[in-house]
Each structure stands twice: as C-alpha cells, then as structure tokens.
C-alpha cells in the first residue's frame, strides 16, 4: 500500500501530449555567442617614454547621432513579493451534490480520469467545493475560535467583526427619517467619504465620530474601517457645508423588527441600537466554534480580512497545484471502492470506477473480442476514435450495411472489455490493454498462487465461451456508443452486461 502523502509529493499533473519544443527555435534569446568566433582584441601599442600621456587616453568625443538625446532609462526588475504567512489552515472538500453527479458520471462512462484533473474540476467553480478552516496552533498561545453568524454562516475572527456584519445586513431593524432642526455652530469644513462621495460631518461637530461609524456600518460594512477612514476627504467649499446643514434637518431613527413587549420601539442613534442588540439579540445569533465550514459561494461575500486573505491565497495555490485537495479526494475515492493507481514514469495517479482485471493463459474470449484484444496488444497507444479505420480498416466515406453491423459489434465488444476491466479507457480516448498474468488467486482460498479452475458454458464441457449474439437491426443503433469522434449520448453509454460473459 502506497503512502498517500509521500507518493503525492512526486506527483505532477497529467500531460499526455508531448510538448512541442520547436517553438523555442523562433524565440530570440540575444546574440548567439556560441556560433560566432570571438573577434581578436586589438593589441595596444606600448607606451613610449617621453610621449604625451594624453595621446592614448584621450576621451572619445560624443557621436553626432547621440547629441541631444537623453540617456536610455533602464527598466527596474520587479522583485517577487512573498505571500504573507497564513494564520489559518485552509483545505477544500467537494460539495455533495456536484460530487454525487461526478461519481454517477464516472460509474456510467467507466472512464479513467487523472486525480489532479478531477481536483481541478472541483476547484474550478465556487459552487463545487466547500472551505474548511481552522486556526494555526501557535506555541504559548491560546487556541483561537471563530465567531459564526447564524443567518448566513459567515465566520469571523473577532466577535466585534461579527457584530459589524450583522449590523450591516439590516435584517433586525428599519431606518426611518424624521424632521429636526439643523445643527448650530460655526463649521468651515466638512468631511466627505472618499468611496461613496457622501458628506459626513465637520470634524468639530460633537456627533462626528458617531456619524462616521454609522455611515460605515450602514453603507460600507464590507470595507475595513481603517481603509474607509484613510480615504476620507476634507471639503472647504461653503456650498458643501450648507448642503450638509440642509441634510441634517432630517435625522435617522432606528426601529426594531420583531419587537417584544418590553423592548424599546425606536433608537435615536445607531450606537444605542448596537448596544441593545449586543446585549439581547447577538448572543443568540453568533456562535463560537473551533473549526468552520462554509460553502465556496460565500467566499466572495466575506468581508476583507486575514481569514479571507488566507482562503483566497490557499485557493489560488490549489488551483495551480491541487496536491492537498487531490490527497483528500484519493482517500474518499478509496472509501467508495474506486480503483486508484499510478501509471507512467511520472507516477500520475488515476481513478476509475472499474477494477482492473488481468487476463490469463486459460482465459478464452469470443473471436471478435480476441481479435480486438490482439489488435490493442500490438497497438498500445491507439485511441478509441481510430479503431474503425485501423482495426476494421473501414473508410470514413459511405459504408455498407455489413460494415455498419461490424462497427456496432465492435462498439459492444469494446464496451464489454472496458466494463469488465480488461481494457482501460482514459478520458482522452486512449486505450490500454491490461497485461497478461500467469495465474490468478481464488478469492477466499488460503493457498497462494493456486490457479483458478476454468469456467465453461452450461452446454458441452470444454466448449468456448462466446458472447451472446444480439440482433443487428439497423433501428437499434442507440444501444451502443459510437466509435466515431462525435459525442455519444447517455443511452449509448449504457450497455447490458447480458451482452456476454467474456472470460472462462
């Protein structure tokens, strides 16, 4: 049994087609230092005693072509920025509904897929995976917890951030406007939001801090407060101050939803409402857990912060090289009795719903199946869409009825040997014949290497086991999948096992 972690470190994504390196010949990498002979360096005349030292060391005069030109600016080489050290351990697991569809498709088609390709398919779209997170354990520090909001299931690192998120959703209260008197005082400037462009309040107004927190909670809940505060602008236009005074003639009043009998009806400020919700409502809406799990679709809706940064960073790394996700899928496929094995010198891992089966010297097949297996043995790198032309030697042009029947029979034979495990059909159409084994072990027997007794048909003993002949009616073309490059339907992928028992 292979070690999942040690073997997967040497694993690379599948690349069946060889890279075309001829394109490198057209690229210009600079002068060809190897093809030209170095020019001989001119010999310097020896310095004669008494001669002027300025003759051999005269500064070269600038060329007329370069007069008036500015020196060429050299581009700066961008330094690679290292990603921040993650504070949370992030992994990705498949979503149940899409993963169930993938399993059903793999069992129906009996195709063999590279494990890394399956991991990339799952990580390709956010609705196909879930995000698992837990804090990184640090020595001499207490283990952190997550604060998850029950309406939505969004995790946060701090309780205050979870409260800010719930305040920004406005699911617990309504906002009403009422008439009021304009603020009195001398105001020469007014602060303006650099993101929304709205006027906030003058810095010398006694409710300045309350108003900017209210604006951030109601309009920019997904933006960090530090970023919002840094982008505030100062407007010294008297018309802006007059516009703000006119807007303050209407004040906001916050009214609770689903109010109980003994709870206040309205709140004059957002701070008073927040204090009430933190004390009475939020304990029931926020829970603390050691590990969190959220759908991938919520990742884009999370407020920016360290947790979201670590999730996005881990997702980018896994999409480039899904090693951790592939290891998780490997163990899950094995629990579902899928065949997981390695192939090739690079050790690429493949997954298939069919268990591979070895042929033995005692195995006898029908004539058409034996002909197909012999052809695959002599042509190990053939693809499915090449069988008609290379095995049957039929042209792509108009075919006779007899040739169409032969193609349908070939499709049935190929489907049977693939579902039985004698031939592996990869997702790219490549066919691989299982090697020939000497002996097979009898399941449940204590002896090792004991040959299995050959099975024969119920008829005359010793007769060859053949596939049951099926009707070759031209109207029953949908019972087999096409060997042509065209796409086959789901009905073509289902072939009854009653088409024959190929081993004896």
Image: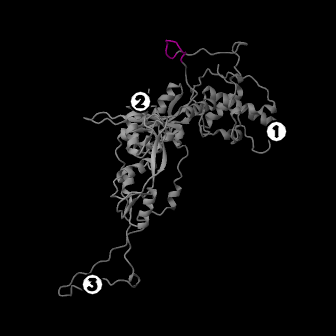
* Residue for badge 2: 3
Q: Does the magenta stretch include residue 443?
A: yes
Q: In this view, does 202 lie above or below 496?
A: below
Viewer-nearest residue: 85 or 179 = 179
Residue 492 x, y percent position in the rendering: 70, 33
Magenta region, mostly helix, strand or loop? loop
Q: Does the magenta stretch include residue 277?
A: no
Q: In this view, does 176 lie above or below 276?
A: below
Disc 1, SS: loop
Disc 2, SS: loop
Viewer-nearest residue: 497 or 148 = 148
Magenta range is 441-449
Residue 80 x, y percent position in the rendering: 37, 54
* Residue for badge 1: 400
Viewer-nearest residue: 267 or 396 = 267
Mark 2 or 3: the one toward you: 2
Q: In which quarter of the image is residue 434?
A: top right
Tell me whether circle 3 and circle 1 mark residues in contact (CB < 8 Å): no
* The N terminus - image quarter: top left
Per the rendering, the mark at residue 58 is: 3
């Amino acid at each position: 049994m292979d070690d999942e972690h040690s073997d997967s470190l040497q694993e690379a994504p599948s690349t069946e087609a060889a890279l075309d390196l001829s394109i490198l010949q057209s690229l210009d990498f600079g002068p060809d230092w190897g093809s030209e002979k170095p020019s001989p360096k001119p010999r310097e005349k020896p310095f004669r005693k008494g001669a002027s030292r300025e003759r051999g060391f005269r500064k070269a005069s600038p060329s007329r072509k370069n007069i008036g030109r500015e020196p060429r600016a050299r581009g700066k080489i961008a330094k690679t920025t290292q990603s921040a050290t993650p504070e949370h351990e992030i992994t990705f697991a498949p979503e149940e509904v899409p993963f169930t569809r993938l399993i059903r498709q793999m069992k129906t088609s009996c195709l063999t897929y590279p494990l890394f390709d399956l991991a990339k398919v799952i990580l390709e779209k956010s609705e196909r995976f879930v995000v698992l997170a837990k804090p990184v354990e640090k020595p001499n520090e207490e283990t952190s917890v997550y604060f998850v909001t029950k309406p939505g299931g969004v995790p946060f690192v701090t309780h205050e951030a979870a409260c800010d998120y719930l305040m920004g959703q406005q699911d617990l209260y309504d906002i009403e406007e009422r008439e009021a008197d304009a603020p009195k005082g001398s105001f020469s400037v007014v602060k303006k939001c650099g993101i929304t462009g709205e006027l906030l309040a003058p810095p010398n107004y006694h409710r300045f801090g309350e108003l900017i927190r209210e604006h951030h909670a109601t309009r920019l809940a997904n933006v960090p407060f530090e970023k919002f505060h840094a982008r505030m602008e100062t407007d010294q236009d008297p018309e802006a101050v007059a516009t703000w005074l006119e807007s303050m003639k209407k004040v906001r009043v916050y009214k609770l939803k689903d109010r109980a009998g003994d709870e206040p009806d309205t709140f004059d400020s957002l701070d008073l409402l927040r204090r009430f919700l933190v004390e009475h409502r939020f304990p029931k809406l926020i829970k603390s857990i050691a590990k969190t799990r959220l759908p991938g679709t919520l990742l884009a809706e999370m407020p920016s912060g360290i947790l979201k940064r670590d999730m996005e960073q881990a997702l980018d790394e896994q999409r480039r090289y899904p090693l951790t996700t592939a290891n998780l899928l490997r163990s899950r496929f094995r629990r579902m009795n899928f065949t997981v094995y390695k192939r090739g010198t690079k050790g690429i891992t493949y997954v298939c719903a069919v268990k591979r089966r070895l042929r033995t010297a005692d195995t006898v097949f029908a004539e058409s199946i034996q002909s197909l297996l012999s052809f695959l043995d002599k042509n190990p790198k053939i693809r499915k869409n090449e069988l008609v032309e290379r095995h049957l030697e039929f042209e792509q042009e108009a075919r006779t009825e007899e040739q169409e029947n032969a193609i349908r029979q070939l499709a049935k034979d190929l489907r049977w040997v693939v579902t039985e495990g004698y031939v592996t059909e990869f997702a790219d159409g490549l066919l691989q014949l299982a090697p020939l084994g000497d002996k097979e072990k009898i399941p449940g027997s204590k002896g090792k290497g004991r040959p299995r007794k050959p099975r024969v048909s119920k008829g005359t003993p010793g007769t060859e086991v053949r596939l049951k002949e099926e009707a070759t009616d031209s109207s029953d073309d949908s019972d087999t999948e096409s060997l042509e490059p065209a796409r086959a339907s789901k009905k073509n992928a289902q072939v009854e096992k009653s088409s024959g028992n190929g081993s004896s």
